[in-house]
Image (spheres, rainbow, N blue to C red):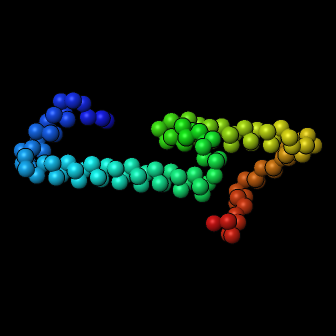
Amino acid sequence: MGINGSELLVLAVLAVVILGPEKLPEYAAQLARLVKELRRMATGAKEQLREEVGDDIADMDWRKLDPRQYDPRRIIKDALLEDFEDAVSAVKEAPVARQRSVTTAKVAPLAPHEPAPFDSEAT
Protein backbone atom coordinates (compact mmCIF):
# COMPACT_ATOMS: atom_id res chain seq x y z
CA MET A 1 0.00 0.00 0.00
CA GLY A 2 3.07 2.23 0.13
CA ILE A 3 4.44 4.38 -2.65
CA ASN A 4 7.54 3.13 -4.41
CA GLY A 5 10.26 5.33 -5.89
CA SER A 6 8.88 5.58 -9.43
CA GLU A 7 5.40 6.51 -8.18
CA LEU A 8 6.88 9.20 -5.95
CA LEU A 9 8.83 10.60 -8.91
CA VAL A 10 5.66 10.71 -11.05
CA LEU A 11 3.78 12.49 -8.24
CA ALA A 12 6.60 15.04 -7.88
CA VAL A 13 6.61 15.77 -11.63
CA LEU A 14 2.82 16.14 -11.60
CA ALA A 15 3.02 18.50 -8.62
CA VAL A 16 5.60 20.69 -10.41
CA VAL A 17 3.49 20.76 -13.58
CA ILE A 18 0.16 21.41 -11.85
CA LEU A 19 1.29 23.82 -9.15
CA GLY A 20 4.21 25.43 -10.91
CA PRO A 21 7.71 25.87 -9.55
CA GLU A 22 6.91 29.15 -7.77
CA LYS A 23 4.02 27.77 -5.63
CA LEU A 24 5.51 24.32 -5.00
CA PRO A 25 7.65 25.35 -1.96
CA GLU A 26 4.62 27.01 -0.36
CA TYR A 27 2.48 23.89 -0.74
CA ALA A 28 5.31 21.64 0.40
CA ALA A 29 5.63 23.72 3.60
CA GLN A 30 1.86 23.47 4.18
CA LEU A 31 2.03 19.70 3.69
CA ALA A 32 4.91 19.45 6.17
CA ARG A 33 2.93 21.48 8.75
CA LEU A 34 -0.10 19.25 8.21
CA VAL A 35 1.95 16.07 8.72
CA LYS A 36 3.51 17.50 11.90
CA GLU A 37 0.08 18.50 13.22
CA LEU A 38 -1.35 15.04 12.49
CA ARG A 39 1.56 13.37 14.29
CA ARG A 40 1.11 15.70 17.26
CA MET A 41 -2.61 14.92 17.39
CA ALA A 42 -1.97 11.16 17.19
CA THR A 43 0.57 11.36 20.01
CA GLY A 44 -1.85 13.43 22.09
CA ALA A 45 -4.64 10.93 21.50
CA LYS A 46 -2.39 8.06 22.59
CA GLU A 47 -1.39 9.89 25.75
CA GLN A 48 -4.98 10.84 26.55
CA LEU A 49 -6.09 7.24 26.06
CA ARG A 50 -3.28 6.00 28.28
CA GLU A 51 -4.26 8.53 31.00
CA GLU A 52 -7.95 7.63 30.87
CA VAL A 53 -7.61 3.86 30.61
CA GLY A 54 -4.44 3.47 32.62
CA ASP A 55 -1.48 1.18 32.18
CA ASP A 56 -3.76 -1.76 31.32
CA ILE A 57 -3.79 -0.55 27.75
CA ALA A 58 -0.04 -1.03 27.46
CA ASP A 59 -0.44 -4.73 28.31
CA MET A 60 -3.25 -5.29 25.78
CA ASP A 61 -2.52 -7.58 22.85
CA TRP A 62 -3.84 -5.55 19.92
CA ARG A 63 -3.32 -8.40 17.48
CA LYS A 64 -6.23 -10.27 19.06
CA LEU A 65 -8.54 -7.40 18.07
CA ASP A 66 -7.46 -7.36 14.43
CA PRO A 67 -10.58 -8.15 12.37
CA ARG A 68 -8.48 -9.60 9.55
CA GLN A 69 -7.66 -12.66 11.66
CA TYR A 70 -11.27 -13.76 12.02
CA ASP A 71 -12.69 -16.31 9.60
CA PRO A 72 -16.50 -16.08 9.52
CA ARG A 73 -16.80 -19.77 8.65
CA ARG A 74 -14.80 -20.75 11.72
CA ILE A 75 -16.81 -18.41 13.97
CA ILE A 76 -20.11 -19.91 12.77
CA LYS A 77 -18.80 -23.45 13.06
CA ASP A 78 -17.58 -22.83 16.61
CA ALA A 79 -20.91 -21.26 17.59
CA LEU A 80 -22.90 -24.15 16.14
CA LEU A 81 -20.67 -26.77 17.74
CA GLU A 82 -20.88 -24.96 21.08
CA ASP A 83 -24.70 -25.10 20.99
CA PHE A 84 -24.56 -28.77 19.98
CA GLU A 85 -22.11 -29.61 22.76
CA ASP A 86 -24.31 -27.77 25.27
CA ALA A 87 -27.34 -29.80 24.16
CA VAL A 88 -25.42 -33.08 24.35
CA SER A 89 -24.09 -32.30 27.80
CA ALA A 90 -27.59 -31.33 28.99
CA VAL A 91 -28.95 -34.67 27.82
CA LYS A 92 -26.09 -36.56 29.44
CA GLU A 93 -26.62 -34.74 32.73
CA ALA A 94 -30.40 -35.40 32.79
CA PRO A 95 -31.58 -37.94 35.38
CA VAL A 96 -31.90 -41.49 34.03
CA ALA A 97 -35.47 -41.95 35.31
CA ARG A 98 -36.61 -38.87 33.41
CA GLN A 99 -34.97 -40.12 30.22
CA ARG A 100 -36.78 -43.46 30.54
CA SER A 101 -40.18 -41.85 31.05
CA VAL A 102 -39.71 -39.78 27.92
CA THR A 103 -38.54 -42.67 25.78
CA THR A 104 -41.17 -45.17 26.99
CA ALA A 105 -44.16 -42.84 26.62
CA LYS A 106 -46.52 -44.23 24.00
CA VAL A 107 -49.09 -42.44 21.98
CA ALA A 108 -52.25 -44.28 21.06
CA PRO A 109 -52.88 -44.38 17.32
CA LEU A 110 -55.99 -42.72 15.94
CA ALA A 111 -58.97 -44.85 15.10
CA PRO A 112 -60.02 -45.03 11.45
CA HIS A 113 -61.80 -41.81 10.38
CA GLU A 114 -60.99 -40.15 13.72
CA PRO A 115 -59.95 -36.51 13.20
CA ALA A 116 -56.51 -35.47 14.40
CA PRO A 117 -56.45 -33.34 17.52
CA PHE A 118 -56.59 -29.64 16.76
CA ASP A 119 -55.61 -26.77 19.00
CA SER A 120 -57.21 -23.53 17.87
CA GLU A 121 -54.91 -21.46 20.07
CA ALA A 122 -51.78 -22.91 18.52
CA THR A 123 -52.36 -21.45 15.07
Residue at 15%, 48% (x, y): give it: 25
**Of the pair 13 and 118, the residue shown nearer to us:** 13
* View extreme (top): residue: 5
Q: Where is residue 94 shown, x and y percent of the image? A: 86, 43
Q: Image check: 108 left or right of 76?
A: right
Asked if residue 104 can be seen in this view, the reply is no
Where is the C terminus found, in terms of image quarters? bottom right
**Of the pair 42 and 122, the residue shown nearer to us:** 42
Q: Quadrant of residue 6?
A: top left
* View extreme (bottom): residue: 121
Asked if residue 20 can be seen in this view, the reply is yes
Residue at 48%, 54% (x, y): give it: 45
Q: Image check: 32 left or right of 95?
A: left
**Of the pair 104 and 2, the residue shown nearer to us:** 2
Residue at 23%, 53% (x, y): give it: 30
Where is the N terminus found, in terms of image quarters? top left
Q: Where is residue 24 shown, x and y percent of the image? A: 13, 48
Q: Where is residue 60 shown, x and y percent of the image? A: 61, 42
Task: Name above or below for residue 8 compared with residue 21.
Answer: above
Q: Image check: 115 left or right of 17?
A: right
Q: Image check: 107 left or right of 46?
A: right
